[in-house]
Image: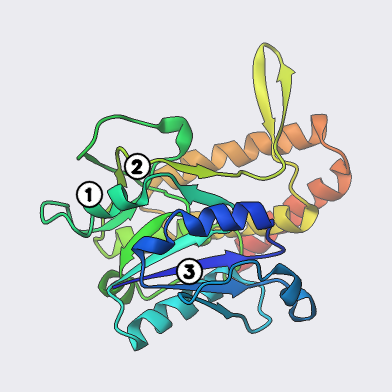
Amino acid sequence: MILAVVDTYFPEEELLYENIESFIDSVDKVVIWENTPADQRDNYRFIHNDKVEYHGDGINSISHALNYAWKYAKDNGYTHLLTMDQDSHIENFSFYLKQTIFNVEAPEGIYTPPLEEIRTTAYRDFEEINRPITSGMLIPVTLIDKIGGWNEDFKIDAVDDEFCLHAHSAGIKIYSVKGVVMQHCLGDLATREFLGRTIILRNYSPHRLYSIYRNNIILMRKYPQFAYIKNDFKIWLYNIVWILLFESNKIKKFVSVVRGCYAGLITRL
């Protein structure tokens, strides 16, 4: 039995509908966790289906939503949890299931689809990876039990990273399932040309930048045995340069980055 959870925050109707339509026929229940404020939720309840239940308790937190779904799955006998963002969809979800939980030869672990830009035709293959995004992960509930769920100190940013690092520490492998295609909206991105290369501007708010840098510093301190975390953090160091060169509200953003780094360094683990 498969439970799907979709975390929403002021969702766009078309994207949310496309998301849920891509898998609803192949799962047993869908929990939509509403991070949208309670007094506005009725305006964003676009999906009407007997399989869908709306939940939310006023806490704006992806990790909290995922832990709620994990408990819901355990309490109601579901064997697998599908975790989805509101603005993603899997093009061939039935194939995803055929290659994973309905495939006796599939390796045990956490499954995730590659993003559209790394589409592959190498069907029936699994590639072990380090860091999938939350959206599209298909996880046996028994493995979530072994990991211990999601760390609710990470509310929005690096939730998936911390979960996967914890999984690796518990000896659980993560596999990208080739031949599956997921499309995912990556937010308010922009590009600039600089010294012959294309720079991606993420345009995060100061609040998000504080959270991103705090949480990534904590990850490096908490999981020093995983060298790829330090290597990947170089992207965020470059991002500081791009903020100062190209983004608006740069001073406030830079201050948030510094505050986030400091908070990450002094947080008790």
Q: Amino acid at mark 2?
A: Val
Q: Amino acid at mark 3?
A: Val
Image location (x, y in percent) of residue 213: 64, 53
Between the C-alphas of marks 3 and 2, the distance is: 19 Å
Earlier residue among tags 3 and 1: 3
Question: Which residue, as the protein is rendered here, is positioned at the far bottom?
Answer: 75
- Tell me, yes or no, whether the two marked residues, 3 and 2, touch with CB atoms within 8 Å: no
Is residue 21 depicted above or below 127 in this figure?
below
Give how far across and how far down residue 13 sits, in percent. 67, 57
Callout 3 secondary element:
strand
Quickly name the residue at label 2. 180
Single out the residue that lies furthest toward the top.
196
Neighbour class for label 3 at 10 Å: few (<14), some, many (≥20)? many
Which residue is at the front of the view, 163 or 37?
A: 37
Query: Mark 3 or mark 2: which comes first in sequence?
Result: 3
Circle 1: is it few (<14), some (14-19), or many (20+) Cα within 10 Å? many
Q: Which residue is mark 1?
A: 99
- The residue that appears at 61% across and 43% down in the rendered structure is 186
Q: Is residue 109 visible?
A: yes
Label ID, residue 5: 3
For marks 2 and 1, give the CA distance.
9 Å
Quadrant where the image shows the N terminus: bottom left
User: In the rendered structure, are the residues bearing label 2 and label 1 in contact, judged by CB atoms less than 8 Å apart?
Assistant: yes
Looking at the rendered structure, the kind of residue marked 1 is Gln
Q: Nearer the viewer, residue 60 or 103?
A: 103
